[in-house]
Image: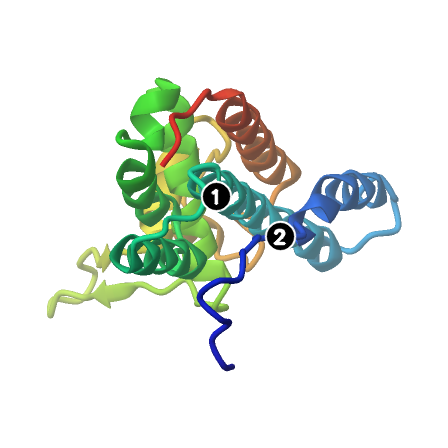
């Protein structure tokens, strides 16, 4: 695209597609009440709610950061213009709670996790994104099983990565009663209570994020 003439004024406008998420999740939760749902379909609904919860946070992060950058107005010096354009591009490419936290610090001067001042809520958000990162790509829950040479010996499993972080967190919160390897179910992590917990956390975080009074970039 050709650059606009230097004497033209510039305005930035955004349309926030994530605003469909809250009513959609509300509708999804009503569908779960049907007694005719199979376990797979119910789990699929909760899978979608968990993903959408993360998208809702990311969309609001981007909206708030871009709004904050734009309130500074346009700069006449070419260097400043390039830096601001680069910052907008960086925000647009950012994904994940911790990466947004770093960009938030760059734009605002302090991380969102510190500005909101709710460590427990931030832990919920970080875990949501660990979860999102594995299920968004359809990753399997995998173990490495190690067996001793003697007959009748006890085997040990090695379990790590995103699902391990999520499982430890859900067990700590009382949202799981057992470990995945004890159940061997594809749907172990996708109970109604788990999906509702992450959507509630996302909603609370976004509400607090939107109430922040931020300095101009």
Q: Secondary structure at mark 1?
A: helix
| Residue corresponding to mark 2 | 13
Q: Split into 4 quadrants, where in the image is the C terminus?
A: top left
Q: Residue furthest left?
A: 149
Q: Is residue 138 left or right of residue 164?
A: right
Residues 112 and 32: in front is: 112
Quadrant location of residue 146? bottom left
Q: Is residue 141 above or below residue 166?
A: below
User: Residue placed at 49% from the left, 50% from the top?
Assistant: 183
Count of numbered marks: 2
Residue at 37% of width from left, 48% of height from top?
A: 75
Q: Is residue 113 left or right of residue 184?
A: left
Comparing 63 with 36, the one in front is: 63
Q: Which residue is at a point 57% across and 53% down the rendered structure image?
A: 11
Which residue is at the far bottom?
Answer: 1
Residue 149, horizontal then vertical, whole percent: 11, 70
CA–CA distance in space, label 1 to label 2 = 10 Å
Residue neighbourhood size for the residue with mark 1, other residues' Cα within 10 Å, grouped as few (<14), some (14–19), many (≥20): some
Q: Earlier in the sequence, mark 1 or mark 2?
A: 2
Q: Secondary structure at mark 2?
A: loop
Query: Residue extending furthest front?
Result: 7
| Rendered location of residue 103, percent (x, y) | 31, 45
Q: Which residue is mark 1?
A: 70
The answer to whether residue 171 is visible is no
């Amino acid at each position: 695209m050709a650059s606009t003439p230097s004497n033209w004024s510039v305005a930035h406008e955004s349309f926030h597609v994530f605003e469909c998420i809250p009513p959609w999740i509300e509708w999804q939760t009503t569908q779960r009440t049907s007694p005719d749902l199979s376990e797979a379909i119910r789990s699929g609904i909760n899978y979608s709610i968990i993903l959408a919860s993360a998208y809702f946070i990311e969309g609001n992060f981007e909206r708030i950061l871009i709004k904050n950058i734009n309130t500074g107005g346009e700069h006449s010096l070419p260097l400043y213009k390039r830096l601001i354009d680069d910052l907008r591009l960086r925000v647009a490419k950012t994904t994940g709670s911790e990466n947004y936290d770093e960009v938030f610090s760059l734009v605002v001067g302090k991380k969102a996790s510190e500005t909101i001042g709710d460590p427990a809520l931030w832990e919920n958000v970080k875990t949501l994104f660990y979860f999102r990162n594995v299920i968004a790509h359809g990753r399997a829950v995998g173990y490495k099983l190690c067996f001793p040479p003697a007959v009748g010996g006890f085997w040990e499993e090695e379990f790590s990565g995103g699902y391990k972080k999520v499982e430890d967190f859900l067990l700590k919160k009382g949202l799981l009663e057992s470990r995945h390897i004890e159940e061997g179910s594809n749907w172990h992590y996708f109970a109604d209570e788990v999906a509702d917990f992450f959507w509630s956390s996302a909603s609370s975080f976004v509400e607090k994020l939107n109430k922040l009074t931020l300095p101009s970039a």
